[in-house]
């Protein structure tokens, strides 16, 4: 059949900033699979990568609204 090898990695990152009422999430996954036949004359390597991004940010606000009326951005979601 031949020799197989594989590498798998995944990361997740989440941030939330209550001062500016923003948050974001990022999920990534990577897979690297390789194969060689028994005579080492044929080789294949396949790379796969997936990223999912999510951002939640307030709409355009004036500095006054941002610092003195942060609930304004809550209504715009």
Image: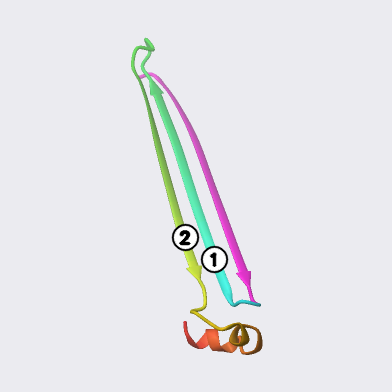
Report the magenta stretch's main SS.
Answer: strand
Quadrant in the picture for the N terminus: top left
Identify the residue at image location x=48%, y=47%.
29
Is the residue 46 above or below the residue 60 in the image?
A: above
Question: Disc 2 marks which residue?
Answer: 53
Give the mark nearest the N terminus, 1 or 2.
1
Q: Are marks 1 and 2 in contact (CB under 8 Å)?
A: yes
Identify the residue at image location x=55%, y=50%.
11
Residue 45: horizontal and vertical position, in percent? 39, 28
Is the residue 70 above or below the residue 10 in the image?
A: below
| Residue range highlighted in magenta | 1-18
As drawn, is 14 to the left or to the right of 4?
A: right
Question: Disc 1 marks which residue?
Answer: 24
Is the residue 9 above or below the residue 57 in the image?
A: above
Residue 21: horizontal and vertical position, in percent? 59, 77
**In front here: 39 or 23?**
23
As drawn, is 9 to the left or to the right of 16?
A: left
Residue 59: horizontal and vertical position, in percent? 48, 79
Secondary structure under tag 1 reads strand
Magenta stretch: residue 14 in it? yes
Crowd band around label 1 with a 10 angstrom C-alpha radius: few (<14), some (14–19), many (20+): some
Residue 49: horizontal and vertical position, in percent? 43, 44
Crowd band around label 2 with a 10 angstrom C-alpha radius: few (<14), some (14–19), many (20+): few
């Amino acid at each position: 059949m031949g020799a197989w090898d594989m590498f798998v990695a995944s990361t997740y990152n989440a941030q939330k900033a209550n001062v500016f009422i923003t948050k974001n999430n990022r999920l990534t996954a990577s897979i690297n699979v390789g194969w060689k036949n028994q005579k080492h004359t044929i080789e294949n390597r396949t790379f796969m990568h997936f990223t999912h991004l999510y951002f939640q940010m307030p709409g355009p606000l004036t500095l006054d609204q941002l610092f003195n009326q942060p609930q304004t951005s809550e209504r715009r979601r």
